[in-house]
Amino acid sequence: MDNVGVIGAVSIVTAGLTLAIGSLGPAFGEARAAAQALAAIAQQPDEANTITRTLFVSLAMIESTAIYCFVLSMILIFANPIWNRVIAAAPT
Amino acid sequence: MRITPDDLVIFEWGVFRLNATILFTWVVMVLLVGVARIMTAGLSDAETPSRWQNFLEVLVAGMRDQIRDVSQQDPGRFLPFIGTLFLFIAVSNSLSVLPGFQAPTGSLSTASALAICVLVAVPLYGIVAHGPIGYLRTYLQPTWVMLPFNVIGELSRTIALAVRLYGNVMSGAVLGAILIGIVPIFVPTLMQLLGLLTGLIQAYIFAVLAMVYIAAASGARGGNDGPAAGTQASDNQP
């Protein structure tokens, strides 16, 4: 396998691993946050407004790690800088 | 496949390149300003306001309430900045269901620009509230050891703000494009519907986070240190 093939294979495998592992953690975190918020709303329905707003903000914060992984894997697949450099340096 | 509308060059003239991001940013700006202009042309304080005026009043009152809830301060100072952020992101995300429209927020440049606006606004509001010395002292807040961490925190949350908005909007567009390739017609439509919801939530979250950051810099804190004592009185103004 030449350089381009190796870089392509490694990029695709890494992108898949990045998304898989990177979405696992935030999924558990968001589940915990949502479960706690639901329990809190069930205990204090009057505070539902504040709890929901805080829940949204914290979900966005937790989710951002998953979004980083997504952006990273998109870059790896569609806009890989190393791939472009190798293609440009190819002697063809 | 494009992962940013920056690459889509619509018009090129010498060094000047008009890409889709700039074009659609201006479309959204013209739309917002134009519609607001038309709507506010016939403002009245009659018993029954026109339906457009009613809509605007609901919008502005809702934003004021949210800002007051989040910041625990008078919303008047923050409304122009936070409201503009929210409206711009919400409109450009919602318009992305139109065929051919590329949401400008789906470009890292636009998202970074908005996040840098927040980065600049935080010290400005902080200095207005506490004065330059009082604001700079907040960087030494628990102890002076925390100074580098406070600075890093300020920068990293700006990056987080930008990448969060960009990633969410871009993921909707890329997912739609991929799904059109595998399962045409039905599933992409559902994903676009979900994208409408996500877009509005992202606009809300961006505005709320900006408000939280600004409120943390400009709000009354502790009550036992000097700078906060002066603002506690001014915060209670109607």
Image (cartoon, rainbow, N blue to C red):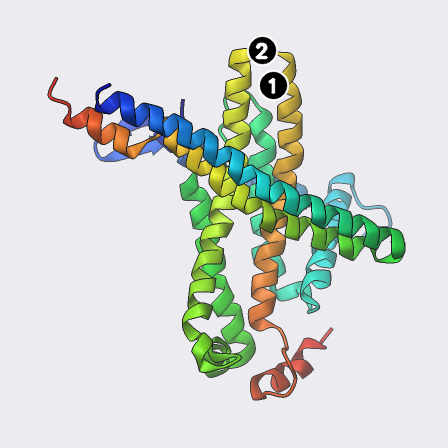
Residue type at mark 2 is: Pro
Judged from the image, the secondary structure of the residue bearing numbered disc 2 is loop
Numbered mark located on residue B40 in the image = none
Q: In the current view of this chain or complex, which residue is farthest to the left?
A: A91
Tell me residue B143's x, y (percent): 49, 82
Could you tell me which residue is drawn at 72 percent across and 77 percent down? B236
Host chain of mark 2: B
B124 relative position to B215: left or right: left
**Label 1 packing within 10 angstroms: few (<14), some (14-19), many (20+):** many
A20 relative position to A80: left or right: right
* Quarter of the image with the N terminus of chain B in it: top left
Residue at the disc numbered 1: B188
Cβ atoms at labels 2 and 1 below 8 Å apart: yes
Tell me residue B56's x, y (percent): 71, 46
Q: In the current view of this chain or complex, which residue is farthest to the front?
A: A1
The residues tagged by marks 2 and 1 sit, at their Cα atoms, a distance apart of 7 Å
Numbered label tally: 2
User: In this view of the protein, can residue B60 be seen by the observer?
Assistant: no
Judged from the image, the secondary structure of the residue bearing numbered disc 1 is helix
Residue type at mark 1 is: Pro
B121 relative position to A47: left or right: left
Could you tell me which residue is drawn at 55 percent across and 22 percent down? B176
**Label 2 packing within 10 angstroms: few (<14), some (14-19), many (20+):** few
Residue at the disc numbered 2: B184
Position above or below: B18 against B58: above
Tell me residue A54's x, y (percent): 70, 55
User: In this view of the protein, can residue B180 be seen by the observer?
Assistant: yes
Residue B202, quarter of picture: top right
Tell me residue B61's x, y (percent): 74, 54
Residue B92, quarter of picture: top right
* Quarter of the image with the C terminus of chain B in it: bottom right
